[in-house]
Image: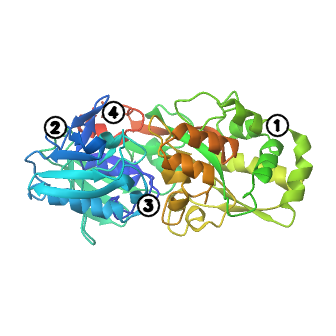
């Protein structure tokens, strides 16, 4: 038995029911995708990669003759039901699900997916493991355990935050080498780290990078995005001049180093695969003479700052607080537990904040609409910044990603902090655990894990 502890933002293991960060990753223990990933999309539940027609707006799929863990055949109607569940929830505001117009079932194992517009990254991310939103295909029902086709099957919910998973045959990813997983959500980085040190946990997803190394486990580090400091555009930072005065006053480079002590130079890019943007770098340049303007603009406002106690977020936001307090600007720190960062009552969802950190996976197919379009604003969507800019919106709508990035940079929509990374703790009992490729869930390779 492998003991796996996780620190997701939600309280369920079904990402269709509880669409919080980290649960989609856990689901790849027991779920498979229509496609898999091996330096590119490969068929998985789909018999082959789908064929495209109608100018890239219609994809024809055929399913393999496979069965769910409860013995039922995997049918086209299951795909339609899974899409309906995703479309009506939080993930439905993200690509590739947002651009799907309908699923047309043409046979028991055949269906077409119709898009509103072409999407170059559609095949690899529609119920696939690559992307900012990586959802496997599942059967989900209220009050029941989720059913998948993956290497492990969910057999029992032991208590409110613990599940028993058992090896299951028939997954196109192969047969697992471990017979059982005891999965537990801990909701405390400190507790998770202690269980790893004492050997009570074999794998911890993730562990804080600031905690000391130990011979009892090894760290696997992966980059999974870029962390941005968000301004709530519906509050006192709604105008460019205030955002600009803030960026020049707070010494962005020093805050970046506080958040990520390994950072040596200013980061001025939202993208994982891009170099610094020179115009954004100039907006972020430290200029203490802007302090008087910032004091004037924020006079009479209380700046609400979201922070995660015990993390480098707390350290970085502490520097922001110190700078603002030194200018006699009122500040209120909103201490938020990690598992409450994305919940329905969280400041990001309700809008009861002015500054917060959040991570984004802007790689080769950046889904800017999910995060910055006027039509995807929180609480229903992922536009936590409540951003709505006509020029950026027009660029997003015409598919001009470069123009959209240009608008976000020039309007100082957010301040980049660092590459977002997380450390996976792997105990001495576990062999053949590999760090996943960029934008692929850590659990995707679970069939290869074994106890030494």
Query: Is disc 2 in contact with disc 3, using a CB cutoff of under 8 Å?
Result: no
Q: Secondary structure at mark 2?
A: loop
Q: Name the N-terminal-most of marks 1 and 4.
A: 1
Which residue is at the front of the view, 33 or 174?
A: 33
* Residue linked to disc 3: 10
* Quadrant (top left, top right, bottom left, bottom right) of the C terminus: top left
- Mark 3, other Cα within 10 Å: few <14 / some 14–19 / many ≥20: many
* Residue linked to disc 4: 433
Q: Secondary structure at mark 4?
A: loop
- Residue positioned 15% across, 48% down in the render: 168
Q: Position of residue 370 (x, y in %)?
A: 48, 53
- Distance from disc 1 to disc 3, alpha carbons, whole Å, reads 38 Å
Q: Secondary structure at mark 1?
A: loop
Is 374 located above or below residue 42 in the figure? below
- Distance from disc 4 to disc 2, alpha carbons, whole Å, reads 28 Å
* Residue linked to disc 1: 286
Query: Is disc 4 in contact with disc 3, using a CB cutoff of under 8 Å?
Result: no
Q: Name the N-terminal-most of marks 1 and 2.
A: 2
Q: Nearer the viewer, mark 2 or mark 3?
A: 2
In the displayed structure image, the side of residue 26 where residue 62 appears, left or right: left
Which mark is on residue 48?
2
Is residue 198 shown to the viewer in this render? Answer: no
Q: Secondary structure at mark 3?
A: loop
Q: Nearer the viewer, mark 1 or mark 4?
A: 1
- Residue positioned 49% across, 43% down in the render: 207
Is residue 23 shown to the viewer in this render? Answer: yes
């Amino acid at each position: 038995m492998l003991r796996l502890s996780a620190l997701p933002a939600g309280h369920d293991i079904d990402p269709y029911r509880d669409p919080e960060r980290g649960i989609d990753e856990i689901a790849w223990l027991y779920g498979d995708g229509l496609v898999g990933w091996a330096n590119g999309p490969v068929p998985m539940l789909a018999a082959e990669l789908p064929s495209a027609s109608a100018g890239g707006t219609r994809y024809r799929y055929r399913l393999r003759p496979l069965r769910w863990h409860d013995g039922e055949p995997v049918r086209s109607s299951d795909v339609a039901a899974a899409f309906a569940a995703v479309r009506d929830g939080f993930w439905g505001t993200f690509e590739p699900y947002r651009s799907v117009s309908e699923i047309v079932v043409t046979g028991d194992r055949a269906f077409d997916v119709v898009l509103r517009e072409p999407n170059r990254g559609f095949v690899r991310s529609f119920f696939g493991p690559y992307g900012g939103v990586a959802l496997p295909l599942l059967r989900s029902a209220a009050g029941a355990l989720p059913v998948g086709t993956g290497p492990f099957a969910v057999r029992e919910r032991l208590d409110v935050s613990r599940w028993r998973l058992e090896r299951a045959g028939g997954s196109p990813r192969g047969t697992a080498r471990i017979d059982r997983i005891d999965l537990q959500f801990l909701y405390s980085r400190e507790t998770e780290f202690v269980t790893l040190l004492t050997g009570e946990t074999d794998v911890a997803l993730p562990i804080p990078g600031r905690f000391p190394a130990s011979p009892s486990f090894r760290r696997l580090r992966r980059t999974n995005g870029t962390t941005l400091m968000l301004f709530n555009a519906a509050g006192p930072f709604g105008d460019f001049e205030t955002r600009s005065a803030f960026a020049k006053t707070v010494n962005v480079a020093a805050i970046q180093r506080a958040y990520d002590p390994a950072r040596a130079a200013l980061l001025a890019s939202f993208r994982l695969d891009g170099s610094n943007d020179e115009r954004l770098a100039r907006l972020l340049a430290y200029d203490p003479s802007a302090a008087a303007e910032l004091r004037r603009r924020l006079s009479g406002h209380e700046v609400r700052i979201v922070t995660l106690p015990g993390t480098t977020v707390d350290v970085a936001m502490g520097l922001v607080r110190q700078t603002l307090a030194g200018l006699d600007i009122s500040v209120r720190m909103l201490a938020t537990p990690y598992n409450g960062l994305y919940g329905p009552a969280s400041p990001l969802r309700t809008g009861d904040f002015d500054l917060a950190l959040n991570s984004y996976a802007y790689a080769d197919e950046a889904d800017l609409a999910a995060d910055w379009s006027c039509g995807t604003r929180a609480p229903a969507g992922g536009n936590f910044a409540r951003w709505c800019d006509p020029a950026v919106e027009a660029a997003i709508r015409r598919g001009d990603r470069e123009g959209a990035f240009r608008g976000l940079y020039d309007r100082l929509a957010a301040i980049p902090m660092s590459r977002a990374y997380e450390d996976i703790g792997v105990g001495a009992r576990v062999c053949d655990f590999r760090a996943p490729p960029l934008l692929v869930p850590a659990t995707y390779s679970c069939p290869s894990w074994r106890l030494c």
